[in-house]
Image (cartoon, rainbow, N blue to C red):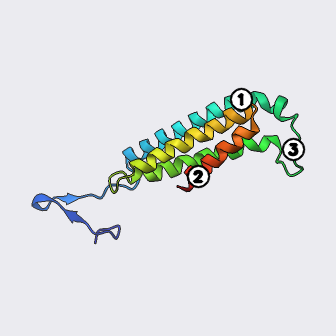
Amino acid sequence: MSERGQDADFGAEGEKLVPAPWFARRELMGLFVILLICYLVGGIGGMVTGPEIAGWYAGLVKPSWTPPGWIFGPVWGVLYLMIGVSGWLIWRRRNVEDVRGLLVLFGVQLVLNCLWSVLFFGMRSPGLALAEIVALWGVIWM
């Protein structure tokens, strides 16, 4: 056992191999890139949504339990963080198993997340947005 309580491996000619840290540089770069993609997608949705909040959306008849408008930004920020981390966890398994299909589904759900904002706020079409959200849930459950 090594000083850290881990078994030490030895390479050719007794050369000691140091285990790679859990957060290797490549892993952190992967996390950064996936989070960047997620937040870019969220930003596109936000650009479509933002101008409609005070106008069209404010004029809609909404149920009494509708959350206040200020909560949407922080909630979507946390949502895209969780989406990004989940995508990164899938990406990290790329060398262990074939995850291409899962990464495709991840990309599809990102596009559908953005499309919802375009349909609901940009096109002002709650009906199309509802149909799209059903498709989004289907992809998420896959």
Of the two numbered discs 3 and 1 on the same chain, state the one appearing first in sequence: 3
The percent position of residue 85, horizontal first and vertical second, equals 52, 50
Side (left or right) of 60 relative to 13: right
Kindly report the distance in space between the C-alpha atoms of the residues bearing marks 1 and 2: 23 Å
Task: Spot the residue most to the left.
Answer: 13
Under mark 1, the amino acid is: Gly
Q: Give coordinates of residue 11: x percent, y percent.
A: 16, 59
Tag 3, which secondary structure? loop
Q: Which residue is mark 2?
A: 138
Q: Which residue is mark 1?
A: 122
Q: CA distance from mark 3 to mark 2?
A: 26 Å
In the rendering, at what x and y percent does residue 34 appear? 49, 41
> How would you rate the neighbour count of disc 1 (Cα within 10 Å): few for under 14, some for 14-19, many for 20 or more?
some
**Dot 2: what SS?**
helix
* Residue closest to the eye, 28 or 63: 63
> On the picture, is 62 further left or further right than 13?
right
The disc, 3 or 2, on the residue closer to the chain's N-terminal end is 3
| Among the 4 quarters of the image, the one containing residue 7 | bottom left
For label 3, the crowd category at 10 Å Cα-Cα, with few meaning under 14, some 14 to 19 and many 20 or more, is few
Q: Nearer the viewer, mark 1 or mark 2?
A: 2
Q: Which mark is residue 102?
A: none
Q: Nearer the viewer, residue 118 or 31?
A: 118
Name the residue rendered at 49%, 47% in the picture.
105
In the displayed structure, does residue 46 sit left or right of residue 10? Answer: right
Q: Which quadrant would the N terminus be assigned to in this image? A: bottom left
Q: Earlier in the sequence, mark 1 or mark 2?
A: 1
The numbered disc on residue 62 is 3
